[in-house]
């Protein structure tokens, strides 16, 4: 079965702290795609990143970085020097053939960044 | 506009009435999804349309819920005989052919009194 698990329901940090959001996925496919989305308090979900299963290079975009490890089926998201504007719900997602190419979301992690 | 458009943005209805929610996806996007999000909760998958394939209706919670899509354009989610537990934000998203990322609309907030 295809599944995405975000074990952290809520995380609270103080501004400037680093924070890592965990994502563990399950699929038997060798080709699959992983995503992160952000839902700020305003409500509209936005896409952050997509990785395919053949590209395990870590990616950095400003204060955001993603660590993809096939050995542990994880695709973790780290925010460095967090800011209040990072407060949001973050969703990890998976697309694979066995899942009918349907986007499968995790339950989301709510991040609170306090000033 | 260039984004996913949903209407109405807010709908208040009485228990037992039928409601229709509309989604205009981004032009050229073959995939369209409907999700339900209750206050403070995650995304509850409802239905997935991909091109001309049969839709994946596995997430529809009851036979009061149905959705249609005309080709690769507009989709309508219909809830019949609404119940108070149907109160939620209904989100629509579209994407290019898989494995494209999803583009979400702003949602339709439904309140059933």
Image: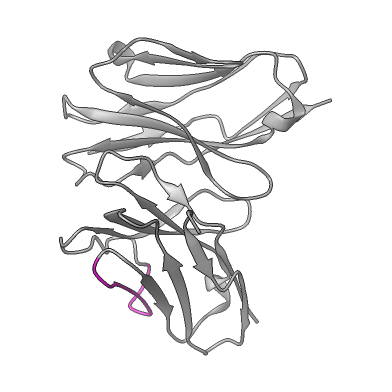
Relative placement, left or right, of A65 versus B74 is right
- Residue B42 vs residue A103, the one in the foreground: A103
- The residue nearer to you, when weighing A53 against A49, is A49
Q: In this view, does A51 lie above or below A109?
A: above
Q: In this view, does B59 lie above or below A97?
A: below
Q: In this view, does B92 lie to the left or right of B14?
A: left
The residue drawn where x is 46% and y is 20% is A76
Q: How many marks?
A: 0
Q: Position of residue B66 (x, y in %)?
A: 34, 75
State the image coordinates of residue B22 (x, y, percent, origin top left).
Answer: 45, 72
B69 in magenta: yes
Residue B39 is a magenta residue: no
- Viewer-proximal residue, B50 or A20? B50
The x and y percentages for residue A73 are 32, 20
Q: Is residue A31 above or below residue A61?
A: below
Q: Give the x, y percent position of residue A24.
A: 38, 25
Query: Which residue of the protein is positioned furthest toward the front in this rendering?
Result: B1
Residue at the spot x=43%, y=67% of the render? Answer: B23
The residue positioned 65% from the left and 82% from the top of the image is B113
Q: Residue at x 17, y 39 (%)?
A: A97
Colour mode? one colour
Q: In which quarter of the image is residue A21?
A: top right
Above or below: residue B109 compared with residue A16: below
Q: Give the range drawn in magenta.
A: B61-71
């Amino acid at each position: 079965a295809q599944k995405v698990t975000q074990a952290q329901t809520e995380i609270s940090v103080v501004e400037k702290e680093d924070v890592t959001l965990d994502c563990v996925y399950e699929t038997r496919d060798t080709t699959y795609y992983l995503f992160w989305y952000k839902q700020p308090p305003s409500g509209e979900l936005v896409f952050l990143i997509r990785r395919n299963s053949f590209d395990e290079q870590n990616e950095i975009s400003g204060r955001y970085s993603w660590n993809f490890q096939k050995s542990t089926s994880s695709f973790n998201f780290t925010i460095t020097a967090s800011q209040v504007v990072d407060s949001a719900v973050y969703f990890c997602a998976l697309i694979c053939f066995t899942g009918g190419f349907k986007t499968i979301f995790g339950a989301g992690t709510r991040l609170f960044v306090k000033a | 506009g260039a984004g996913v458009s949903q209407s109405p943005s807010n709908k208040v209805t009485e228990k037992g009435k039928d409601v229709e929610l509309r989604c205009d996806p981004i032009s050229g996007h073959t995939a369209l999804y409907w999700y339900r999000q209750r206050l403070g909760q995650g995304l509850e998958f409802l239905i997935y349309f991909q091109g001309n394939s049969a839709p994946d209706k596995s997430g529809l919670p009851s036979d009061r819920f149905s959705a249609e899509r005309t080709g690769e354009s507009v989709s309508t989610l219909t809830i019949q005989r609404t119940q108070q537990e149907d109160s939620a934000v209904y989100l629509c998203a579209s994407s290019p052919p898989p494995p494209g990322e999803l583009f979400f609309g702003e949602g339709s907030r439904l309140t059933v009194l």
